[in-house]
Image: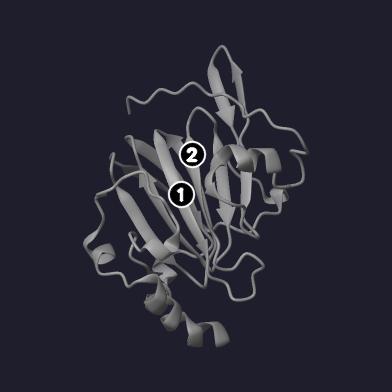
Amino acid sequence: MGYTCHLQQAVCTGSQHGGETIHNLEHLAIVHGSPLDGVMIRTLDARTDERGWFMEVFQDYWNGPIKPVQWSLVQSRPGVLRGLHMHLNHDEYFMAVSGEAYVGLRDLRPYSPTRNRSCMLRFSCDRPTAVLFPRGLLHGWCFTRDTLHLQAVSESYRDYNEHDNLGCLWSDPDLDIPWPVDQPLISERAQGFPSLAELERLLEPLWRN
């Protein structure tokens, strides 16, 4: 594919075992906002030798918020923004294999201690990192370089419920997500997404169910 990357393990303190979120790593990855409840950020270790390197990108024993049933590899060009999407029925995983990506999250869960808070995380292949997050978080990814990312969901795409594939307009200032691109390339569907206030009104009866 023509991609090369120097792998470097993030320097952090605290436990790296048992699926614990590493708080020093959070501060390395988060470039805006603060940690959100239930979101796990994991450093990924590359084991290298003269043949190359090997990296585990997911383990059940991390006890993260997702049990993946589908994995996808996605290529994006510089200036692309995917989202923002919102699901009530499945959890997700994101990792940049090459390039650079910014992940924007906003907590819309009415029962969450971090409700109505946002954060933005930066991912690049020079610091292999994954984010795992639960359903109920508005999310989108923006790319500043040619990027390959690995994405997992806890529900197969073929089983998606049309009424659970919600979205929000990426540029709504109430999101408090400072995207690194002023005029991103987005899908035709995303151009018609509602404002944050409109999405929250749509969600009110769904949360009650």
User: Image quadrant of residue 158?
Assistant: bottom left
Left or right: residue 16 compared with residue 123: right
Q: Secondary structure at mark 2?
A: strand
Residue under circle 2?
A: 123
Q: Few, some or many C-alpha atoms within 10 Å of disc 1 (few <14, some 14-19, many ≥20)?
A: many
The residue at which mark 1 appears reads as 103
Question: Relative to residue 144, is residue 68 drawn left or right?
Answer: right
Q: Quadrant of the N terminus?
A: top left
* Residue in view at x 47 percent, y 69 percent: 87
Asked if the residue at tag 2 contacts the one at tag 1, i.e. Cβ–Cβ closer than 8 Å, the answer is yes
Towards the viewer: 81 or 5: 81
Q: Does residue 149 sit above or below 48 in this rendering?
A: below
27 and 45: which is toward the camera: 27
Q: Is residue 8 above or below residue 49?
A: below
Q: Earlier in the sequence, mark 1 or mark 2?
A: 1
Image quadrant in which you'd find residue 113: bottom right
* 92 over 109 or under it: above or below: above
Cα separation, mark 1 vs mark 2, equals: 8 Å
Q: Secondary structure at mark 1?
A: strand
Q: How many marks?
A: 2
- The residue most toward the left is 188
